[in-house]
Image (cartoon, rainbow, N blue to C red):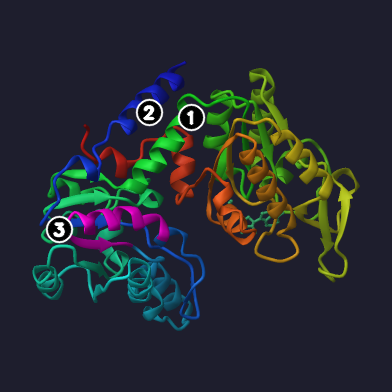
Amino acid sequence: MIKSLLFQCLFFIYMNKQTIKDIDIKGKRVFIRVDFNVPIKNGVIEDDTRIKGALPTVEYAVEQGAKVILASHLGRPLKDRKKAEEKGLPYDESKYSLKIVAENLSEKLGKEVKFASDCIGEEVKQIVASLNDGDVVLLENLRLHAGEEKNDEDFSRQLSELADVYVNDAFGTAHRAHASTAGITKFVQPAVAGLLMEKELNFLGKALHNPERPFVAILGGAKVSDKIPVIKSLIERKVDKLLIGGAMAYTFFKANGMTVGKSLVEDEMMPTALEIVKQADEAGVQLLLPTDHQVVDSYDPLNSRKTIPIEFTNTGLVGLDIGVETAATFAHALEGAKTIIWNGPMGMFEEKPFDEGTIAIAEAVADATGKGATSIVGGGDSVAAVNQAGLDDKISHISTGGGATLEFLAGDELPGVAALNDK
Ligand code: AMP
């Protein structure tokens, strides 16, 4: 009951935020916090979903004649450097530069995107001062400064000196109270949502507040511990069906006394798994777990691959993906759904052929969407599966947030949204 009231409050708070369209930005220096934290391998951007996601806001700001200042993080450079130093390994800072993103964005916008080699300081101030209306500059990785993740006041103030208006379009980092997502709003007003942020809040807000039913949630990935709050919240929101795949299912099986071999399990989460099963049962939520899986033995991984019923798992086997029977059962459970939320892969998605189960679920979600469901897919691996299968235009909303989506669904306040002005 209390949780339900909390959801109502959060829903109205989130739906009531000012957006970039509510304010005058012509000729103003508009600082847009974007999420350009894209995967880059050997100098190539592997997935540009997040850059594409920011385009509507950036294009709108350009059309309105704003001086557009874009800021983002990329990876965790300082943490990685510390780790490398501790282990005596080489550290290459160039891997954390957003320069390559500026080039990519420039192609997408069809106009020059200037690049500033830092995000604070004199050089940046000069570049910003030289911007004409409609010009765009991307600042270097915010997380090259320790002040960003510490939400440091002085760093926030230095960022704020570049801006007349603050826009947060980085839903993916809205669950973090960092300098560029929260601290800066103390020094720059107005502080409003970007169009991607607005879209994310609308889709997720509606799904939680007033979902059209049947409402089906699919959760996967490695750890139950990461997803407990969201599982509990979905049960409290009385999702009609909850489908659990991926390694997290093994904790449920082991808690039930089944043999899971060498599959990934969080032993300390077994009591919680049993509690979740009981809660789902009491709430009338249909909880579906895999019935078969793809296993290997640890000696000859690929050659030993086979699909077996879960209960045939012996101690030498490792489960790495759901089996075809489970994929079919999950697909069947999605038939007739009106709202679908999916977060987390069904198996060790990065290693072919253990992406098959996840791709099958992507196809089933796309299929259900074609038949009238509103589908929301979040989390890096599930989004990658949808993109890999070429199904991105068959999903109602691909969320750019992984952790942020989960925290939203769990009913937690997102500091990056809370900091924005109400209408
Ligand atoms: P998460 O961050 O919790 O969403 O987990 C994503 C990770 O779970 C991915 O890296 C997958 O490879 C991994 N994963 C999912 N299922 C399995 C499995 N059965 N065995 C090992 N890893 C898995």
Q: Are marks 1 and 2 in contact (CB under 8 Å)?
A: yes
Q: Nearer the viewer, residue 31 or 56?
A: 56
The image's mark for residue 208 is: 1
Q: CA distance from mark 3 to mark 2?
A: 32 Å
Mark 2 lies on residue: 11
Kindly give the residue lying farthest to the top in the view shown. 1
Q: Judging from the image, what secondary structure is the residue with disc 3 in?
A: helix
> Is residue 70 magenta-colored?
yes
94, above or below 109, in the image: below
Mark 3 lies on residue: 154
Q: Earlier in the sequence, mark 1 or mark 3?
A: 3
The answer to whether residue 150 is seen in the rendering is no
Q: Quadrant of ligand 1?
A: bottom right
**For the C terminus, which image quadrant?**
top left
Q: Say whether residue 370 is left or right of residue 250.
A: left
Q: Say whether residue 414 is left or right of residue 206.
A: left
Residue 180 sits in quarter:
bottom left
* Residue beneath the point at 36% across and 72% down: 107
Q: Say whether residue 96 is left or right of residue 298.
A: left
Q: Earlier in the sequence, mark 1 or mark 2?
A: 2
Which portion, as a residue range, is magenta?
52-72
Density class for disc 1 (Cα within 10 Å; few <14, some 14-19, many ≥20) is many
